[in-house]
Each structure stands twice: as C-alpha cells, then as structure tokens.
Image (cartoon, coloured by chain):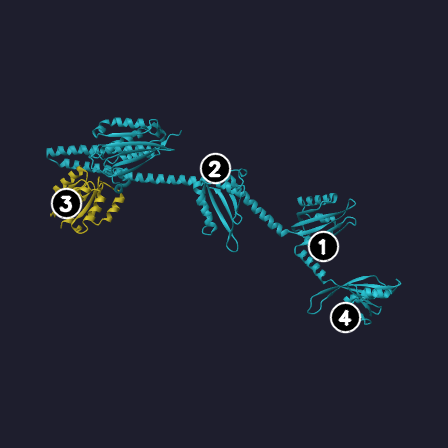
Chain colours: A yellow, B cyan
Amino acid sequence: MKKFKNACIIDDDHIFIYGIKRLMIEVNFCEEILVYNNGEDAIKAFTINKQSGRPVPSIIFLDLNMPIMNGWDFLDAFCKSNESGLDNTIVYIISSSVDPRDLVRIKDYAVVKNYILKPITANDLEAIQKEEVA
Amino acid sequence: METLLTSSFIKDYPASVVIVNPQMRIIEHSKLWLKELENRNGSPIGIPFYDIIDYTDEGFSKCCEECLQGGKITKVIQKLNPPEEKTRWLEWTISPWKENHIEVNGLIIIKNDITETKRKEELLLKSKRISRIGGWEVDLLANTVYWTQVTKEIHEVPMDYVPNLEEGINFYKEGVDRDKISILVSDAMNEGLPWDTELRIITAKGKEIWVRAKGEVEIVDGICVRIYGTFQDIDEKKRVELKYQEVSDRLAIATKAASIGIWDYNIVENVLVWDDNMYPLYGVKKEDFSGVYEAWESTIHPEDSKPAQDQLELAINGEIDFNTEFRVVWPNGEIRYIKAVAHVIRDAKENAVKMVGANWDITTNKKAEKKLKNLLDITSEQNNSLMNFAHIVSHNLRSHSSNLSMLSGFFVEEKDKDEKDQLIKMLCEASESLNETVQNLSEVVQVKTDALDKMRPVNLYETITAVEKNLAVLLKEKDTVCEIEVDKELKIKAIPAYLDSILLNLFTNSIKYSSPERSLALRITAEKNGDHTLVTFSDNGQGINLKRHGNAIFGMYKTFHKHKDAKGIGLFITKNQIESMNGKIEVDSQVNKGTTFQLYFESIDL
C-alpha cells in the first residue's frame, strides 16, 4: 500500500502523540511525521517551510483543545495563509469532544475531511490510507 | 257741549273705537279706527258698520244683538284666517251706549289686535308641552284641585279627570317618595316653605316615572289658602343622570379599589387637578401641598422627571400617545414605580386643550418582572454552564480514558522490556491525570453546592497577608514587590475558605505568568462603595490578549500560555467561588504589560 509523504500531528497531549506515532509506524502510514504542540507552533513552522520551499504536509491530524492557539484558530490561520494550494492537504480533526456544537462547526471548513473521536486505532489509520492514497 | 266733548274725546282715543246706533250705522269713530281701514275714501259716518267691516263672524253679530237688547259689556275673540296671510287674533269689546242710563242708544265697539299676545301664549303652551311642564293648584278654601292638561298627561289620566289633594299625593310612589312629598307639603302648609324636589310617581297606567315637583303656598292672615306649583316630567333626563351617577360611582369604587389615580390637566389655563387616589400613590398628603404640580415635582425621581415631561410635551404635540412609566420617591425614601397613561383632548382646530390621565402603582409588577428576569438570567446561565460542564467533563474524562485504553492496548502487545517500562510510566501518568481531573471536577461541584449561609465578615488585609506568607518562597524567587493598599480594619462578607482560595489562585497565576524580563510587582487595593467592596489585584506579568480570548479566560480548561502547569481550571473555580458569594470578577489585561482583576464583594452592613 502506498503511504503518505508527510503526516502532521498538532496536539498538546504527549501520550496521544506517542500513541498515534506508534500506530503510524505500525501501519506504515507515512514517510515523515511532524509534531506540534499547539496551533501557533504549527503555523510558524509551515511559514518557515514555505519560505525554504518545503511543501505543506499532505495530511494533518488536528486536536481542538490546545493552549495558545486552539484547533479552530489554527484552521482559520491555516486557510488564510494557504488560500491557493489547499487541494494537496487534508485535515482530520481528532478530539475527545462530543460537543454537538463542535460537530456542526467543522462543516464550515472545506479543508476538514472528517472528525475522529479519540482514541484513534490502527484500523482508522489504514482506512484513511486506503481512501486518500490511491 | 257734552256731545261735542265726547265726540272729540272719541276721535283722539288711542285705540280703535267705533260707535254705532241701534241700526249698526256708524255714528262716531276714533282716528285710529279710520286709519286701520285701508283704501277708504270719504267719511264713514252714517254708513252701516257691516258694509265697512265685512270680516266679523256670527259670534260677533250675535253679541252685538244681545248687547242692543240691554246686555252687558262683552268680549269676543275672533280668529281670522285670511287667505295668503298670517293668522290674526282680534278681541272685540262691545259695550252698550246708554242715554239717561236706561235706553240703549247704540254700541261702543273697541277692536284690539291681540295676535302677538295670542302667539306668545301659544308659544308658552307649546314650550310647556315640549318640556313637559304642567301646572297645578289647590284652593284650600274651596277645596278644589286644578291640573293643567300637561299635568294630566304626565299622570296619564283622562282629560276629564278631576283630581283632589289626597289622590294627587297618592300618585307618588309608596315609600320614600310619598313620605317625602307628604312632609314637604305639610311643611309648606304649616311654615310657608316652598319646595323643589325630584321624586317618582306611578301613573294611572302603572308606569313609574321621575318628576320634578315645585310648589309654593299663599298664606293670608297666617292661614294657608292656596298651594300651587309646577310639575315636570324629567324621567328621561333623570334616568340618564342616574345611569351616569351609577357608572361614575362604579368607576370611583373601582379606581379606589384598584388605587388608580385620575388627573386632569387644563392645558390652556395650566391647571392640574388630582383626584384623592393620586396622593397615596405618591406617598404624600393632600394638605401638605399648596398645588398639585408642586406635589408631583417634589416626589418624582430626579432621573425620571425630564423624560416624563418630555413625553408629556410630545403627547400634547400629538406625536405620541402618553403612555409612560416613572419612579417616585416617597418621603420615607421608598422608590415606587408609577404607570401613567393619558388622553389629550383637542378643540375643533386640533389644539390640545385638556389632558385626562390615570396613574397606578406597578412596583409589585416591576419587582416581579425584575426578579423573573434575574431568575431567567441565572437559570439560563446555569443551564449554559451545566451544559459546558457536561461537555468538559465528557471531554476531559474521555481524553484520559482513551489514552489509558490506547496505552494498555500497546502494553499487551509489546514484547520489548524497555518499551514496556516506558508504557507503564505513561499509564501511571494518564491515570494520575484522570484522578486529578476527577478531583477538579468535584471541587467545581463543591463550589456550586456550597451554601451562602457560610458567609461571614472576614478581615481582608489579614487574609491577604496570610496567603502572601504561604507563598513567600515562590514570591521571593521572582523578587516580588508586593504593595497592599488595604485598610487593616476593612471587612467583607465572604466564605473564608473561598476567599483564601481566590487570593491563592490570583497570586499563583501572577507568579506562574510573570514576565521573564522583569521582576514581579503586585498591587492590591480595596475600596468600599456602599453595598459592595471593590478589590483590585494587579500584576506586571505576561498579560493576555483579551481581544482574542475574551471571557474565555474564566472558562473551564482554557489555557492561553505555554506554561507547563497551565491547567485552565483555576480562574474557572475562582469565578464560581466569587459568584457563589454574590460577587463578580472582571479582568483587564495588556499583553506584556500586566493583568488587573477587579473583584466585587458584598460589604458588611454597618
């Protein structure tokens, strides 16, 4: 099975990060894993990458509740700074929130592909891989 | 000589007089008589009377014949209806003219045009009929009673009815009406007092009607000889009046019972009148004020006086209907809410001439409305916070439990010993986090359920210094300068444990988020403003972008800094604790300048 070139995780929970990284390696999900602990760190890194010609990650796993810049603020900033060329990136929200207001709100963002309720499993990652990497 | 004298006397007599001989030939006449004959040439002397006056009737000629036979002076009234002319009335006075006082030598005929008198009489009769005024008279000497036609009509008796005094009285309705007229008549007869009263009679046909009865007596030598008066049918007017009275009595009772005050403002003369219900609404006594406007002005709430007067002006100008509310301050200091509505009355030219309005007290409604609104606010806020709470709880528990399940899954499959140790460490961490979350949550629930009756006066300064002392080591690490500008005697109403917790949290927040570029400076002030005491807590730390985060700062599990200890629970609990003590907390902050919290507490009543 083909794998993603680079996957990005934006989450402040280091146990979750450990878990998803471990699962990614297990299912051979991608070639490279980028980790940021909040939205602001991610946006800053993307900007620097862009200047040095490195592409935006092809898939982003985004948490909603984070300090400094939460998932929503990240989405706003991300969409604004990548008005063109978003086709190459897909975002999956991964959260523990079952708040229906959050589920409604993601519909406002075309870039968000789906919403995954924690915990994430190896099966979830394989399904994404199957669907997205033809 | 005598004849001559008589003759010239007749000629100049200032009436229409004619003298005829027994054959009805004219012997003499007054100048006036001749003047009234139109188109008459030559002397009428010797000409038969009937040749000249052709319009007399049979009654007239019969009278003349009787008079010539030696009759007495007679008067005949003749109604003339000449074609295409107005009706005229003539009064003929025919008297025999005797020589030597025995033999009748002719007649003296005096003509008098009484048309005007007759017309006035008719008019009077007509007006009496229209206004339904009848007359009556009792001759106490002859013991006869006379009723005019209208009086009979009012009593609904036939025209040939012959009344007597007793029967007349018996027409009055049995009971108060008859008793009253009996007393009035008897007083009149004994003391000569006139009467004028309104009573009910029962007519011959059994109909009950209101009449106005007026009476007077004629007393001769101390004896009442005659009673007379008028009798008017006022039934329609009286019933309308009674109906009106009933309605206005009912209105008066209703407005009194409902404490509705009525006022009346004469715009043209600038005179304001209040009814008696108005004064209690304003908590004042009528006798304490010389004028109504003065009473109104002295009680209206200063803030509401101008708007109310503006409204009044707009209503007079016809721009709005007068429908407003204002507060009044009673002399005992109590504030009451008054609802005021009014109607403007305009003249034919649309000028406002008068305003009639009503006032009533809506304080109870206002208070209930306020209470209800408060309750609604509290309920929706509580509902909102409960909803958030539920989501937060589920989110936080879920994030830890999902980590636990994920880690335990890895652990089962893991073969590598070092990796297994690593997993155990993380499992412990996750379970500890879960435990901490549960503890936080129970703390939040605790705040929400703690009762207000634990509130008591607490010395603010002592509490602050105690917390400061507890944190002495941490504060020293940051080289903290702490300014406490609080009156050492000042006490506020608080739950001591909460006040400790709030101050501890604010201190630790300031330490945690102090600026790495400068040493920490804290400033705490307190000021009593009537029923509340404002405490400010300022630092010179990192600050927070309030535009971006707004009041989320007090939300649960909201963190805004990279600090490793940021848990997003402290300010949430602080806010809940303050609110449960009927206080509130506000924040003001600038990034990299510092943060100031304003805390409002209840003052101690003195």
The residue under label 3 is which amino acid type? Ile
Q: Chain of mark 2?
A: B
Where on the picture, by quarter, is residue B9?
A: bottom right
Q: Residue at x 50, y 49 (%)?
A: B343
The residue tagged 3 is A48
Give residue B562's mark. Answer: none
The residue tagged 1 is B148
The residue tagged 2 is B330
The residue under label 2 is which amino acid type? Trp
Q: Return the disc, 4 or 2, that comes first in the chain's sequence.
A: 4
Q: Return the disc, 1 or 2, that comes first in the chain's sequence.
A: 1
Seen in the picture, residue B20 relative to B427 is either above or below; the reply is below
The crowd level at tag 2 (other Cα within 10 Å; few <14, some 14-19, many 20+) is: some
* Discs 1 and 2 carry the same chain letter: yes
Percent position of residue B225, x then y: 77, 47
Q: Determine if residue B357 is in view.
A: yes
Query: In front: mark 4 or mark 1?
Result: 4
